[in-house]
Structure formats: structure tokens, C-alpha cells
Image: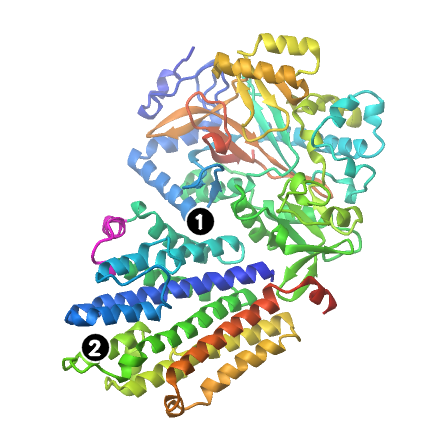
Amino acid sequence: MLSRVADSLYWMSRYLERAEHTTRLLDVNLNLMLDEGPTGAERRWQRVLQALGKPKDIEWTGDPYALTRALIFDTGNKASILSCIIAARENSRHVREQISTEQWQRLNSLYLQVTRPEMQSNRQAEALLEGASQPTEFLQSVMEAVHQFQGVTDSTMNHGEGWQFIQVGRYIERASATALLLEAYHQDLWELPEHITEGNEYLEWMGLLRSATAFEAYCKVYTADLTPDRIFEFLLLDEEFPHSVRFSIDNLQGALEKIQGDSGKSRAEALRRLSGRLQASLNFSSVNEILNQDVVSYLRGIQAQCRGVHETIYALYVDYSIQTALAG
Amino acid sequence: MQTAPSKQFEHSALKNYLLDHAYDEMFVSSSRELHPHCEPLLEHFSSLPADELQRRKQAADLSFLNQGITFTVYGREEGTEKIFPYDLIPRIITAAEWAKVERGLTQRITALNLFLKDIYNEGRILDDGIVPREVVYSCKQYRRQMAGLQVPRNVYIAVCGTDLIRLENGEFVVLEDNLRVPSGVSYMLTNRRVMKRIFPQLFRSYNVRPIEQYTQLLLGTLRSLAPEGRPEPNIVLLSPGVFNSAYFEHAYLARQMGIELVEGRDLVTHDNVVYMRTTNGLRRVDVIYRRVDDDFIDPLAFRGDSILGVAGLFNAYRAGNVTLANAFGTGVADDKALYAYVPEIIKYYLSEEPILKNVETFLLTRPKERQHVLQNLDKLVVKAVGESGGYGMLIGPQSTKAQQEEFARKIEADPRNYIAQPTISFSRAPCLIGDVLEPRHVDLRPYVLYGDKVTIVPGGLTRVALTSGSLVVNSSQGGGSKDTWVLSQ
């Protein structure tokens, strides 16, 4: 597979995963916001910004709707949902002949839906054009579209090397995003504010789980009995839940092994070591061990290792020098 | 002078349908009766309610947009992606008409190919004075680098798209040869797909010859041109990239052929061998179907400021390690001044009369012809020899005095750079304009493939000048397209 193509597929997938994550986070928080007094608002939205990696030039100004509008529609900001969708679509355009027609049509029509609202049905158009105060419907439709894209990707594209690069992009983004989400919530998860009214801690914890689509899955495992250590364990170490860090890293590792098999790399040693170590540390740790250390720096460590894996993938498959390639 | 069709065709959809001296593809001009092969078409069309037609038209438009079948308009920031306007009414060509076109095109590509081999090697046609040396050597597309170079199977033009028009008597003539990187074939293929979905019964009732095999034939053509000793050639399509106006087509063709779509930055050369960068290291490339112009393809051999090309590609080509389709320097044979000599070229190499005629052409390097042209600028069409896409053109009857004077100055300054032709009112075909049918001028670009033999899929891209009265069919200038049906009997 062409290096440039692998690069585009990887980023197409990462950007879509990012768009979906941002969408869900905003949707959940807009919904939960309705149940709280005004004191919690700043804390809540600062946390959202932190979970999104503190996007440049977007500040909390006291108006949640202004903030969500910026995070959704501001194309001047690289982290906004619109920017992510545009970037994903641009990447897919560069590899139009590599993805299936169904994938392209699903992504292209999402792109047209968000960039040319005048072509859409009236209600959605209003939500977009006027930046209506309730963008929930819009957020729902974006999430649906991304899910459909993933379904179509799995069912219409060859599960060859290109598909594996899509998995790599998706899971590396998801692992970092979930780790960052846990980091952002860390303080509130354990140290509830004094003045919190009864029942509100439950809402907060539910919000965290729902930000990772984990609420129902959590209840199936632990029942609706929410406790911080179980939430933490579930989002970090659960083996079967698709948004947990461990699940993401397992799948990342699986896709990388397939790619190494396909392209028969003997020089993939460095990559194998990095991703294997990350996977092993998640598979063979207990939640108590992790909680006994500095949790924030542990979570940051995971994000740093994800960045390391990303850079090594680049050096190996995309941005290698011709001399090394000819020698090898 | 315009007349309406015969009384029996007093259909509300035909209320704006007026015949003039141009050949009409639905009604016979003299008798104002329907061409027999158009009967089922008009009947089917009349049976559909107006809103049903509009519904189908919208379905077609949306299908193009969702599939991303768009082209890029240069020079504007916003909304640079547009769909190529598409007309619902198919253009129908009878089996007999097509048979002649097919023979004529085969003859023409064979002769032009022999001509290219000759001028880049012995130059017999120049020695014999059939084509003046200065016409060839003064052409900007003449590539000295190609002199004496052997190309596989002696095929220079593997893919060509010839623009045909119909004169007032209905005869097909050649307006232009496109021998460099002709585009539009993806529109031909997608038009057909959309058409079959929108008018299935009508399509079936007509016995239309299929065109879907085009991409397979193209792949076969490219494979037949692989360098010797490469039985399993790695074939790629080289595109300038996503910002090129024809990028959709590049991606479409690559996907349909199952070959890699590469850009200049994907290719590297080493020891006169071309490689592409893959996730598994470097992989050798044997045949390049290139959709990048000569000028931009190798910054070492041609334009140094090009970032679209591959440094060292020309040397690898010269060494015979890679085939390029089309070859370098084919543009000399579609130069608009050389066009005037094509009938002589056919006679010279094949000892045959040209089956498809040329449009009468005045060469402005000849003083007498130049004089005539300068006196009749208001009646003639003047074209710059190296331009395409409808740019650099003066259409006399539709021009202002100021434009004519500007062209007169340009011609005096550089007569070799221009040619003139009579303004031809080429044929018109029915198009759906709003709710009614109106005639619009159309041309036809069939696609000719030349590998181990010449193949032409029946039909081609019919381009439409959608503005009433306009003679410019180019997509960059408000043109559209329609499906072309060649009947099997």
C-alpha cells in the first residue's frame, strides 16, 4: 500500500473518532447541565475543555451555548467538530479510490450536511444556520453518521492493510481520548465538593460514563451501583468494553500485528516493543496498584506512550528515507 | 430564420423547440418530421408528467453530488467543487452513423501515430515536404528529448479523445484531436450508470451498445505497452493530485482498474528505475498512465518549478525501464496549426482518403490566408493553437469590435500562435430546459485506445452548450453533458 494512502486513511479515521468523541461529550454535558445549579457550570465546562485537550483560542466565558457553538461550528478552530469532519473528508478525498463507494458517500453526505446546511431539511438547517440554542438534534445526527460510517467501513471494505490503518487511527485516538477524559475527571471523581446536593454525585459519575458510551455497559457488569474505583477500572482496564483504554490498545496492537504480517517488516522491532509494552502494562495491572500511585501522571504516561507509538508508525511506514528502504 | 416542427408534434413540451439551419438530431430540418429513431424517445418523454421528470432530474443531481462526481473550477476560493451539469435526454446515434465514425477514428489515430514516430525518428514526411519543418519545430509541444527514442510497440498515443461535430448536413467532422491527457471519460461512464437507473425501460427498448468495458480495455491497453521482460507489470495512474480539476476521474479510473493512484511525491527514481513508496518499502513501477502534462512531469527534464512531477522520470523512460502513456511530445500532433495537415498525413502514410473530414482551417502564417482572416474577424472563429478548454478563443459573430481588434493585434504579433475557422453552427440535440425540450448545440468526444490494436467503445462524451445559442461546450464555460446511445442496429 502507498505510504501516502496509509497516512490519509489513518488520519481520516482519527479525525472522525475525534469528531465523535467531541460530539458525545458536548451532548452529554448539555443534557446534564439542565439538572444543576449555576455554581457547577464553570467547573463542568472547564472540565470539558480539559478533556478535549484545551483547544487553542476557546475560552469559557460563562455561556455554555456560546462555548458549544464554538466547539461545534467554529472552522477557525482545528478542534471543532466541523473542522474534524472537514479534515476527515479531505483525507478521504485523497484516497477516494481506496475506500468503498458506500464509505465515501456516507462521509461525503455528512460533510455536505454540515457545510451546506441549505441543502438539508428545514429543522436541521435552522439548527446550523442560526446556531440554535439547542444543537442536540444536530449532535445526534453527527453521531449517527459516524456510527454508520464505521458500520459501512466494516461491512464494505476489504479487511486488508488499509482497513487495519483505519483501525490503528481509530483506536490510538480513542485510547488517548479516554485517558485524557479520566485525567480531566480525576479530581471530581474522588474529591466531591462539600456543597454538592444529594444525588448530584450520581449524575456526575453517570456523565463520565456516558461521555464514553459506557453507562449501560457498566451497569451490565457492576449494576447501577456507581463507585469511583469501579468506574475508573471499567474505563481503563475492562477487557470487553470498546471504549476502555485496554480494549483500544488491544485492538491497536492487533491491527499493528496484521500490518506487520502484511508488509513483512523485520524492522518493526521498535514499534512492536513500544506497543507491546503498553498493552502488557494494561493487561497485567490491577486497579489498586494504579490507584496507589500518582494517577494523573500514570494517565499522562499512557497518552505519551500513544504519541510514541504514533511517531514510530510514521517513521516506519510513512516518512522513511529512501536510502534505508533501498538498503533494506 | 427559425421554424417549428410539423403540426403533428404540437406537444406542450415542444413549444420552444425551433429549428434553424443547424442540423437537428431530433427533427429532419427539411421535412420538419421526427427522425425515426427518436420516436420512442419522444413518446416516452411525452408520457411522463412534468413533476415526475423534475423528480428524476433531482434524483440524478443528488446522486452526482453524493458520489462526489465534481470538477474543480480554477481561480475561485469558495465553492470550487461543482457538479458537471447533466442533461436527462439521451443523445442517440444510429449504428450506420457510428460505423463510419469508428472507421474514421481508427484511420486517424493510426496515421497520427505513424506521424509521431516519423518526426521523432527519420522525418520522412518532412523531407518529402508534406508537412513543413517549421510547423513541427515551432510547435511548443515538440520535444527534442524524444528524438531517436524507441517507445514500446511504437505506440505514442495510447489514449486519445477526438472532438467531433456534425455539420449542417449531419456529417461528422473532426474539430480537434486531444492527444495529450484527454479527460471526461469518467463522465461518459457515470452518465450511463445514472441513465440506466433513471430510465430503465426506455434504455432497454433501444438496444444500446454497452460502454462499461472501457476501464478493462484501458487496463489491457496499458498492460500491452509494458517494457519487455516485465510479464506482470505494475501499472499506476499518475495524477497531479486532489486539486486538479479532473481528480475525480483519476480516482474513478484507478479504482475501476484496480491500480494504484499515485502522485509525484509517491514516486522516486533510483538508477533509472521508478519506484513507489509503500508501507512495505519501495516497489518498482512499470507502466505509468499519466494524467500530468509533459511540462510538469519531470522537473529535471522539463519545467524546473514543477512540484507535481518526479525527478529523474524522463531518464528512466529513456532507459526503457518504464512506459508512459501517452508518450512525451504527442502534443505536437494535436497542435491546431498541424491539424490542417492531418488529411495529408493520412494520405501520406496510409494511401487512403480521410474518412472523417477536417473543418476548413486558415493558417495565419500564410500571408493570403491571414489577410482574409483579418478582414473577416467578425465571421470566423480564431483559436490559439496551444490552448484548450475553450480559453483563448474569439467567436467572431458573438464578439465585440474591441475583442476583434485585440485578436487582430495578437495575430499580427504572433501568427504561428493562431488559426481561424469558419463559424460552424454544429448540430443541436433536444435538452430538458425547465419543463420543456429545447435544442442545444452538442459535440461528441469518443475515446480511442491504442495498444496491441485500436479499440473504441461505442459512443463517447456528448457535451452540451447549455446556454441558448452558445457554441461553447466546455465544462469550465457553462457546458454540460448527456449520455450517448449508440444503437446496435
Q: Chain of mark 2?
A: A
Task: Find the magenta span and give its range.
Answer: A121-137
Q: Nearer the viewer, residue A312 or B257?
A: A312
Residue count near mark 2 (Cα–Cα under 10 Å), binned few <14, some 14–19, many ≥20: some
Whole-percent x, y for residue A107 in the image: 41, 56
Q: Is residue A325 above or below residue A232?
A: above
Disc 1 to disc 2, C-alpha distance: 43 Å
- Residue B418 visible in the shown view: yes
Total numbered labels placed on residues in the image? 2
Q: Nearer the viewer, residue A97 or B284?
A: B284
Q: Which residue is mark 2?
A: A203
Question: The residue tagged with tag 1: helix, strand or loop?
Answer: loop
Q: Amino acid at mark 1?
A: Gln
The one nearer the camera, B265 or A186, is: A186
Picture coordinates of residue B459, whole percent (x, y):
56, 35
Disc ID at residue B67: 1
For the residue pair B298 and B319, the one nearer the viewer reads as B298
Q: Nearer the viewer, mark 1 or mark 2?
A: 2
Residue type pointed to by label 2: Leu
Whether marks 1 and 2 lie on the same chain: no
Q: Which of the 4 image quadrants contains residue B414?
A: top right
Q: Residue at x 52, y 21 (%)?
A: B426
Residue B354 visible in rendering: no
- Give me the disc on residue B161: none
| Residue B443 is a magenta residue | no
Tell me which chain the residue with mark 1 is part of.
B
